[in-house]
Image: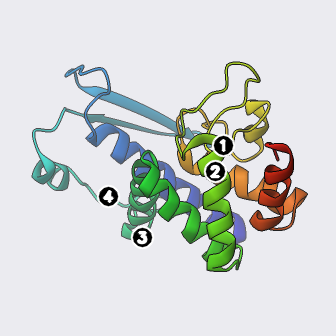
């Protein structure tokens, strides 16, 4: 029973992501129809989506067809949508600060004081720019990971996903310094952490 539940959950997320990627315009401006194919344990699902003219068209193309593996759940689509919204918001320094504060307080249980320290630290390091790159050392991202490939432990999309960089940075700080304020003390003494 557990494997079936896990399979349905995985299928739901895959379907939601497939929907979102087929519904959004291409990054390269290609207006040709997109086809996606997913194989799940011998079962095949093929879907084709034409480019959409506007947001209203997105909702008219949703088909909630039942399958042996489950169906698309609105909660899963909402989750993917929320994650996408966080990523887009974090591409700008103000949004990145909001995302980091929410993660730091809600997921790690830190206080506003710890966020103030984190804000000071990462303002010194990268000015909250997810594209920040130190040509001399090779440090990269909001938290200035060195080498940048260290962020692979969180996700391999660290080059383009500021939320991955934030999650890695907070994880690194808590593992090495316990708190952002302790990391800031190290930075104030040596100008690195």
SS type, badge 1: helix
Mark 4 and mark 1: Cα distance apart in space: 49 Å
Report which residue position mark 1 lands on: 125
Q: Secondary structure at mark 3?
A: helix
Rendering quarter of residue 125: top right
C-alpha gap between disc 2 and disc 4: 46 Å
Q: CA distance from mark 2 to mark 1?
A: 5 Å
| Residue 15 in sight in this render | no
Q: Is residue 71 above or below residue 158?
A: below
**Between tags 3 and 2, which lies in front?**
2
Left or right of 117 on screen, residue 44: left
User: Residue 13, relative to residue 28: is it above or below?
Assistant: below
Q: Is residue 136 left or right of residue 157?
A: right
Q: What is the crowding at mark 4: few (fewer than 14 residues within 10 Å), some, or many (at least 20)? A: few
CB under 8 Å between callouts 3 and 2?
A: no
Mark 4–mark 3 Cα distance, whole angstroms, equals 16 Å
User: Does the CB distance between marks 4 and 1 fall below 8 Å?
Assistant: no
Q: How packed is label 2: few (under 14 Cα within 10 Å), some, or many (20 or more)?
A: many
Between discs 1 and 3, the one toward the N terminus: 3
Question: Which of the two discs, 4 and 1, sits closer to the camera?
Answer: 1
Residue 64 image point, x, y percent: 30, 60
What residue is drawn where x is 55% and y is 44%?
A: 127
Task: Indicate which disc residue 122 carries.
Answer: 2
Disc 4 target residue: 65
Which of the marked residues, 3 or 2, is nearer the chain's N terminus? 3
Distance in Å between CA atoms under marks 3 and 2: 33 Å
Callout 4 secondary element: loop
**Between marks 1 and 3 in the image, the one whose residue lies nearer the viewer:** 1
Q: Are marks 2 and 1 in contact (CB under 8 Å)?
A: yes
State the residue position of label 3. 75
Query: Quick one: 140 or 28, which is closer to the camera?
Result: 140
In primary-sequence order, the first of circles 4 and 3 is 4
């Amino acid at each position: 029973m557990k494997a079936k539940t896990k399979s349905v959950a995985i299928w739901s997320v895959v379907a939601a992501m497939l929907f979102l990627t087929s519904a959004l315009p291409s990054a390269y401006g290609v207006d040709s129809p997109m086809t996606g194919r997913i194989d799940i344990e011998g079962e095949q699902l093929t879907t084709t989506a034409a480019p959409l003219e506007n947001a209203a068209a997105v909702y008219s193309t949703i088909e909630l067809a039942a399958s042996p593996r489950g169906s698309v759940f609105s909660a899963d689509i909402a989750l993917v949508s929320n994650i996408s919204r966080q990523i887009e918001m974090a591409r700008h320094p103000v949004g990145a600060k909001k995302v980091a504060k929410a993660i730091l307080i809600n997921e790690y249980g830190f206080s506003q004081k710890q966020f103030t320290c984190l804000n000071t630290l990462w303002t010194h390091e990268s000015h909250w720019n997810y594209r920040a790159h130190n040509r001399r050392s090779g440090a990269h991202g909001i938290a200035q990971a060195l080498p940048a490939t260290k962020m692979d432990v969180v996700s391999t999309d660290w080059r383009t996903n500021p939320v991955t960089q934030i999650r890695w940075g907070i994880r690194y700080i808590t593992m090495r310094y316990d708190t952002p304020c302790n990391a800031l003390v190290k930075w104030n003494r040596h100008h690195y952490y």
